[in-house]
Amino acid sequence: MKFFLTRLCALLFAALLAQTSAPAVAQSTETPDVNREATGGAQTLQDILARQRGETVPLDQGQAGPLPNPEGAPGELGTRGGASDSSLWRALRQGQDVFTSTNRDPLATTMVQNDGEAWLATRQGPLVTYTGYAFGGILILLLLFLLFRGRIKIDGGKSGIRIDRFGFLERFAHWMLAVSFIVLAVTGFGLLAGRDVLVPAIDWLNVKFLHQDGAIDTAYGKNTFASIIGAGKWAHNNLSWAFMLALVLIFVLWFFRNIPTWTDVKWFAKAGGLFSKNSHPPARKFNGGQKLIFWSVILFGGSISASGIMLMMPYEFAMFSPTFEKLNALSAWAGFPQNLATETTPIQEQQYAQTWHTIVGIVLTVIIIAHIYIGSIGMQGAFSAMGSGKVDLNWAKEHHNMWVDKLERKGNLVNVDTGEPAYPTRPAE
Ligand code: HEM
């Protein structure tokens, strides 16, 4: 009992003491001009109190002038009065050069990088989400197109006469581009979203089909995914060279045939006749839609390649700040604001490269899914152009009449199976 009373008295006394000592927040400071000379530029008591009042302290906005300890990082950690470590960490967070290093790694003096958080959030959030929407969207559109329009048939039926469309080199370049692109797309989106999509999928398959008898390995999905994506990363990096080589070949081989002409405008005005039967707007060897595919492949493929090289060889190139400078100049000329960052750090360049690589990758993959559809199940007679390199004469006349006419005028319209001129199916004039 005596012990209990003593403890109660001690508690009451402590409560009384707490009542009489004024809280630190209640202290007021009316000094608007803070003199930081005494602290060597570091924060002062006024700064701390101002923050507690919810005011903005210039120091927090990187306007404080010299760093608290210009000679370098403090030797010992611990309470350092006015020259507190919080100023140092704030400076680090604001990206100021606090340290120097003899290490040649461009990141050696970057300890905290605020933009990294925004980049990571974008990579794990919108980039994954929009990839899903984009792929889902194009698949639904193509399915609807197939349902309502059906397979685009050769209106006049097959003639049985085959003519040459693409030579060996063209087909070789096309398939090198196609195979490498498909592997790059699959592994690339695996790297982006595999952890979210494949790990649960593999776990589900494991539970459903492999280990239904109880003992479930909870790390199965992650471990299996790690092996798959390790190989995927290797394939992604190495096949990129095949893609770039094929891109150059395709550009050289087909550049002249893909220069836009007035015929293409008319082709687009009729939507290429894609939505109605028996409608075939005039076209040369490549129609307007194909030219659009060609230039998308060249421009987006080129841009994916450039940003991919940046990712494969980190910190070797800075492509975004010079690009942003030019875009700002263009904006200024057009009377728009110029707010793209022109002073990027090496790590920011990498982050921009990753984001851009993915965005352009999504756009090109969507275009290519549509291309694969129309080049295979979507249009009767199209695939053989890239398979055997030969097409049915009626298909050619319906989809590329100007090209056929030109071959005929030059005497080059030949039935590849007989070696004879392929004239007989031409309607009598
Ligand atoms: C399995 C996948 C693919 C199939 C079945 C396919 C089919 C075809 C066919 C049949 C043509 C010739 C069309 C014609 O005779 O007029 C063609 C052309 C072309 N392909 Fe592919 N392709 C595939 C993948 C790709 C990929 C992945 C790329 C690029 C990344 C690509 C780029 C091109 C280009 C630029 C052309 C010329 C322009 C055009 O005809 O649209 N192809 N493709």
Image (cartoon, rainbow, N blue to C red):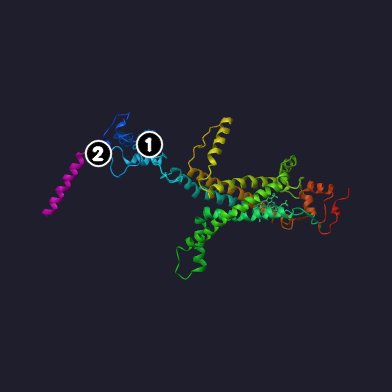
- Give the number of marks: 2
Choose mark 1 or mark 2, whichever is in front.
Answer: 1
Which mark, residue 348? Answer: none
Relative to the observer, which residue lies in front, 8 or 74? 74
Q: Is residue 386 visible?
A: yes
| Residue linked to disc 2 | 23
x then y, percent, for residue 189: 55, 53
Which quadrant, please, contains the N terminus? bottom left
Decide whether residue 347 is among the magenta residues.
Answer: no
Q: Residue drawn at (69%, 54%), measured in percent from left and top?
A: 375
x then y, percent, for residue 410: 84, 47
Q: Is residue 240 above or below residue 30?
A: below
Q: Magenta residues?
A: 1-22
The answer to whether 108 appears left or right of 339 in the picture is left
The mark nearer the N terminus, 1 or 2, is 2
Q: Is residue 146 visible?
A: no
Mark 1 surroundings: few (<14), some (14-19) or many (≥20) residues within 10 A: some
The answer to whether 108 appears left or right of 183 in the picture is left
Distance CA(mark 1)–CA(mark 2): 24 Å
The answer to whether 286 appears left or right of 227 in the picture is right
Q: Secondary structure beneath disc 2? A: loop
| Residue linked to disc 1 | 60
- Callout 1–callout 2 Cβ contact below 8 Å: no
Q: Secondary structure beneath disc 1? A: helix
In the rendered image, the residue lying farthest to the left is 2
Q: Amino acid at mark 1?
A: Asp
The answer to whether 296 appears left or right of 382 in the picture is left
